[in-house]
Amino acid sequence: MSRARRLPIVDAYVEDGRAAVYAGNGEVIALSELATWAWSTLPEDWTPVADLAAGLVAEFGEPEGIDPLAATRATLRTLADHGLAEVDDD
Amino acid sequence: MRTPSVGDPTGVRLKALEVPLLIRCEGAGAPELARAVETAWDSCRDDAAANGDAQEIRVRYDEGDGSDPPGYDLTGTDLATVMDQLSPVVTKTAITARAGTMLMFHACALAEPTTGDTVLLFGPSGAGKTTVARILGRELGYLSDETAGVRDDLTVVPYPKPLSVLSAGSPIKEQVPASRLGLRVAGPGPFRVRAVVQLRRQTSGGGVEVERLATVDGITELVGQSSYSRMLDRPLHRLAALAHDVGGIARVTYAEADDLRPAIDALLAGRP
């Protein structure tokens, strides 16, 4: 089962539902509302992606035309690409 | 090594971002180099500095010796090239010394002469910071064309360095003192930040467009043009506080620096 966890950051600033996050790797990125929710919900301990997907549906409703699990995975992959999360797809 | 002293003909004392520096000019061309540094960096001279408290930058200029002996921060056989390369060495030394003590931006800083109200215009190389400083700095006070330090009270530390100007027919940028370009002296200050502007130059046509960025987007852009922000406590919160104080970070898209003044005046006056 795939799982994910949050990585340490330098700082984060949240306003109007969106976050600017200063990653530990030095990159600073502005997140969408969905990515902000995913990042802020993601614990520092490994967490099943399926649990996060269930939380996403509870928060935003069923995404149109895309599997919630796939949408969550894509969001987490984006966070991982910017040094904000670690994803284990095993 | 002998001790540098006030009046030393091969030592030029500067202050950059309030960091005392001693430019030690060495090699056969030392006197000529010292004169060039004194002229170009006239607005940053700090002859009153006490001995021993300045960071030393060792520069060797010798037309007839292309060797690169150890121990120098900069060496060269061509004066214009040495002067061109000295500018980033001075800036880097200053911002490194200032790391963790203040916000520092890759920005042009200009102040309204009577009030000290200051606009920071930030952007990467090529955004037009030096050109904007040359144009708007004839009426607004010149504080810097590329590096602005901001204290906790949101006042700017002046760094009126020479401007890098590309001369016709030369691949080397000339280091020209602000006074020779007719730029206005900023006065005693304090220089309080009233507007923060992201410069976006477009190559063709169009007028000047101003938009306010959402705080999250604005500080993301601004931190990308900052130095050593990571060494500050809660850097994004500091930037957000700055953004809120000035009514939001503005993005100005323009083609000609000559057209910018009305937009900058409006932003300095707090108008959207």
Image: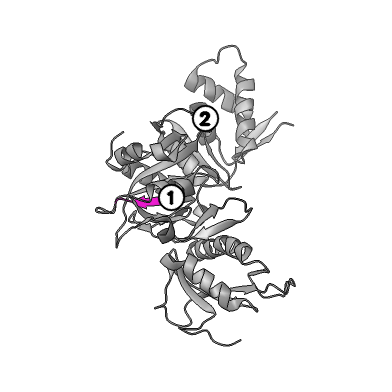
Q: Is residue B158 left or right of residue B227?
A: left
Q: Nearer the viewer, residue B150 or A15?
A: B150
Q: Which residues are magenta?
A: B108-112
Furthest-front residue in this view: B169
Q: Residue B117: x, y in percent?
A: 29, 50
Numbered badge on residue B197: none
Q: Position of residue A2 (x, y in %)?
A: 69, 30
Crowding near pointer 1: few (<14 within 10 Å), some, many (20+)? Answer: many
Where the N terminus of chain B falls, by quadrant?
bottom right
Q: Is residue B266 placed above or below B238 in the rendered structure?
A: above
Q: Nearer the viewer, residue A60 or B192?
A: B192
Q: Main secondary structure of the magenta part?
A: strand
Disc sitting over residue B134 in the figure: 1
Q: Which residue corresponds to the image point at 48% horizontal and 37% vertical from the top-left?
A: B200
Residue B271 spot, x, y in % from top left:
28, 36
**Distance between the Cα atoms at labels 1 and 2?**
20 Å
- Kind of element beneath mark 2: loop
Identity of the residue furthest to the top in this view: A65
Given residues B10 and A18, the one toward you in this image is: B10
